[in-house]
Structure formats: structure tokens, C-alpha cells
Amino acid sequence: MITIANNTLRDNKFGLVFRVSTGALLSSIDAATDVYVLNQYYKSPELVNQANALVAMIVTNFLFQMAIVLAQYQKKSWGRKLKEAMICLLFLRPVVDAYRVSTNHEDKRKIVDSVSELTINKGIELGTESVPGCVLQLYVWFSNPEEAGTLALLSIGISALTTGFTSAMIGESKKERARPSPCVRDGHRPSLARPSP
């Protein structure tokens, strides 16, 4: 029974929507809790350096995502590039990517498809902000739990959950692209596989 449920979630369009929506929600909550933790760190004189390190991680994530936006939308107008930059700046990239994947958004003038763009952005987020931020927050919690605050544990938990979920999605995405989907209907693949041209 569990195998049937797993296959249904994997091969069904609603399973795809559920996975990318859950990932977007977790990433958005992670960003909000990181802003809270950042505020807590700046309130304590002992944690200013750690706050600056967290800001550096967030800025690095933003800069890498901006490089992807400029590469991905190089054939688009500067207005479109500015719109995509604002999406990154307002921490809405996971939500917009999830929407584009779940609606099977296609744009012939983009370099890669929406699923690949989501995977690249998630990988950048993992490598530049989620994993290093979680490690930093754990270090601060163990060394200065009073200054970090009790809600810092929530942020650590959300960061760990986001990291695990995103890693699993990226791994599942690679496995699904390698195997043919059993549910191809009218040229549409409801899994995370690339849409057929």
C-alpha cells in the first residue's frame, strides 16, 4: 500500500505540486526564521560577528541566484531581468520556481527548463545559505544559548528540515530523469522529468 502511495505521489501531477509547494513553504519559513535569528544576533554584542557571517551567507546566495537570473534570462528585456531580481531580493524565488514547475511553465527563450532552474536554485541555496547557516546557528546555540534565544532552536530545526527535504527532492529529481515515466499522457510527464519538446 505504501509503495502505491509513493508511486502515486511520484508519478502524479498532484504529487509534483505537493512536493514543490512543500519545498517552497519550507524555504520561505527558513528565510523568515533566519531574519529573526539575524535580528537576535545583532541585539547581542557577543554575536555581531556571527550575524555578519549569516548576512554574508544570505548575500552570497543572492549573488549566485542573480548570476543564474542573468544567465537564464539573457535573451529577455532588462525589465524582465529586474522583475526576476526583485523575486530573488524578496526571498520569493522558491515560491515562484515552485509555481512555474507546478503549472508546467514553458519559455522557449530560457536557457534551461523550469525544473532545472528550480534544481539549480535549490542547490545554490543549499550550498551557500541553508547548510552553512544551520551549522553556524548550531555553533552559536551550543556556545551562547542565552544570547541566541529559544526561538533559534526553531530556526535550526526548520533549516535542517529544509536542507533534508531539498536534498531528497534533488536526489529524487535526478533519479526520475534517468528512468522513463510510466504515466506519459498526451506528451506530458507529470513527474519531475523534463517536458518533451
Image: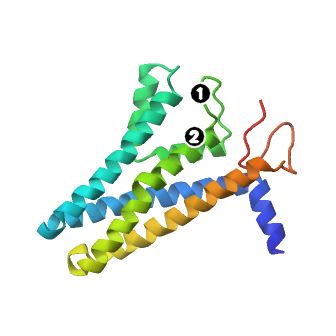
Q: In the image, what residue type sits under mark 2?
A: Glu
Q: Quadrant of residue 11?
A: bottom right
Q: Which residue is mark 1?
A: 110
Please tell me how crowded label 2 is: few (under 14), some (14-19), or many (20+) other residues with Cα within 10 Å.
some
Q: Is residue 196 left or right of residue 20?
A: right
Quarter holding the C terminus is top right
Name the residue at 80% across, 62% down: 7
Name the residue at 84% across, 48% down: 180
Q: In the image, what residue type sits under mark 1?
A: Lys
User: Residue 57 location in percent, x, y?
Assistant: 34, 53
8 up-or-down from 89: above or below: below
Q: Quadrant of residue 78?
A: top left
Please tell me how crowded label 1 is: few (under 14), some (14-19), or many (20+) other residues with Cα within 10 Å.
some
For the question of whether residue 70 can be seen, the reply is yes
Q: Is residue 111 left or right of residue 88?
A: right
- Tell whether label 2 touches label 1 (CB within 8 Å): yes
Quarter holding the N terminus is bottom right
User: Residue 59 location in percent, x, y?
Assistant: 32, 46
The kind of secondary structure element at disc 2 is: helix
113 up-or-down from 141: above or below: above
